[in-house]
Image: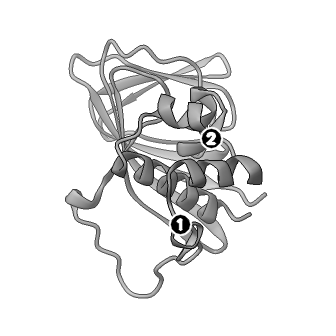
Amino acid sequence: MNEDIILQISNRIKGKRKENGITLQQLAESVGVTKGLLSQIENNRTVPSLVVLLSIVKALQVDFNDFFDGLGSIQTGGPMVIKSAQHQRVEKEYTKGTWYYRITSFKHQGKLIDVMLYKQAKNAKKGYVSTQAHEFNYMLKGKAEYTIEGEKYVIEEGDSFYYDARKSHLSTCISEDPYEMLVVYFFDEE
């Protein structure tokens, strides 16, 4: 399955769940999976089995045809303008003090590109994470310390860095105000 379709499915599940006012816990119980697994599915951290995916759609009380309609279609062609009001809030790890906003995602030369705005507060409780992508990050505001495989890197406003995010990494805000960073994920084809 292509990464762009998986991302679209993840976004659609989360969107339909929120439209219906269903919590992660309620949906997880209806489907018979853990809340953590459902969160990973919604945040594109794992791919659900077909049985789990169909159970999720059924529990959301969405027509199967409606749910899958238009998946895989990505707008191509001329310039792409995305207004700030179109940014989608994305909940990833169970972390207080972090915010993700999806600006856009698209395919380029057969690879999925996911563009996010990420914010992290000084006292955010965040553990080590990994993502099935490479990341390019540009620090818009603030200061952070990244730990990647035991090496520490300080990133300040105007700095950028690129790394293999499949490796376990930890970010810590070391500025008084939350740092803000543009994050571009480059997913490898499986």
**Is 90 on the left-hand or right-hand side of 68?**
left
> For mark 1, what is the residue?
63
Q: Residue 52, how many percent across, how many down?
A: 70, 46
Q: Earlier in the sequence, mark 1 or mark 2?
A: 2
Query: Residue at coordinates 20% horizontally, 58% vertically from top-left?
Result: 85
Question: Closer to the camera, 145 or 80?
Answer: 80
Query: Residue at coordinates 48% horizontally, 54% vertically from top-left?
Result: 11
Amino acid type for the residue under numbered disc 1: Asp
Quarter of the figure that contains the C terminus:
bottom right
Asked whether the viewer can see residue 2, the reply is yes
Q: Outermost residue toward the bottom? A: 77
Q: Residue 86, how many percent across, how many down?
A: 27, 61
Query: Residue at coordinates 55% horizontally, 47% vertically from top-left?
Result: 59
**Is 92 on the left-hand or right-hand side of 181?**
right
Quarter of the figure that contains the N terminus:
bottom right
Amino acid type for the residue under numbered disc 2: Arg
In which quarter of the view is residue 29 placed?
top right
Q: Whole-Å distance between the Cαs marked 1 and 2?
A: 25 Å
Q: Residues within 10 Å of mark 2 (few under 14, many from 20)?
A: some
Report the colour scheme: one colour
Asked whether the viewer can see residue 49, the reply is no
> For mark 2, what is the residue?
45
Label ID, residue 178: none
Q: Is residue 53 above or below residue 145?
A: below
Q: Quick one: SS at disc 1?
A: loop
